[in-house]
Amino acid sequence: MLEQIDKDSANNYNIPFLIYSFEEEGKISSIIVNGNGKSMRDTRENRQLKSAAKPMVGQSSK
């Protein structure tokens, strides 16, 4: 998703992150969470604060 990184004239980053949720009975849902901040690290923290889910990249929550 690197092509989706935006940086405005005030040097603020806006970086989206796509989250997939694999649920029972084969249901798959997705949501895009945008992060904003002065650095790429700040955008990640901002996205994590907005997301109710605990980040577990590539792992099952069961």
Image: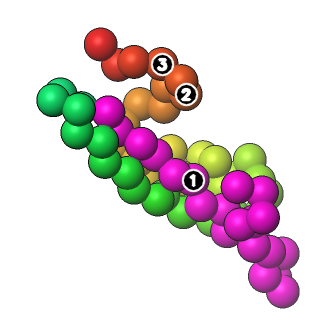
Residue type highlighted by circle 2: Val
Residue 57 got which mark?
2
Residue 17 got which mark?
1
Residue 59 got which mark?
3
Q: Is residue 56 left or right of residue 27?
A: right
Instruction: Kindly check if marks 2 and 3 are in contact, taking CB atoms under 8 A apart as contact.
Output: yes
> Magenta segment: does it hold 6?
yes
> Magenta segment: does it hold 49?
no
Of residues 22 and 51, the one drawn nearer to the viewer in this rendering: 22
- The magenta stretch spans which residues? 1-22
Residue 60 spot, x, y in % from top left: 39, 18
Residue 51 spot, x, y in % from top left: 40, 47
Q: Is residue 12 left or right of residue 17?
A: right
Q: Is residue 37 above or below residue 47?
A: below
Badge 1 crowding class, 10 Å Cα cut-off, few under 14, some 14 to 19, many 20 or more, is some
Residue type highlighted by circle 1: Phe
- Helix, strand, or loop for circle 1? strand
Of residues 33 and 50, the one drawn nearer to the viewer in this rendering: 33
State the separation of the CA atoms marked 1 and 3: 17 Å
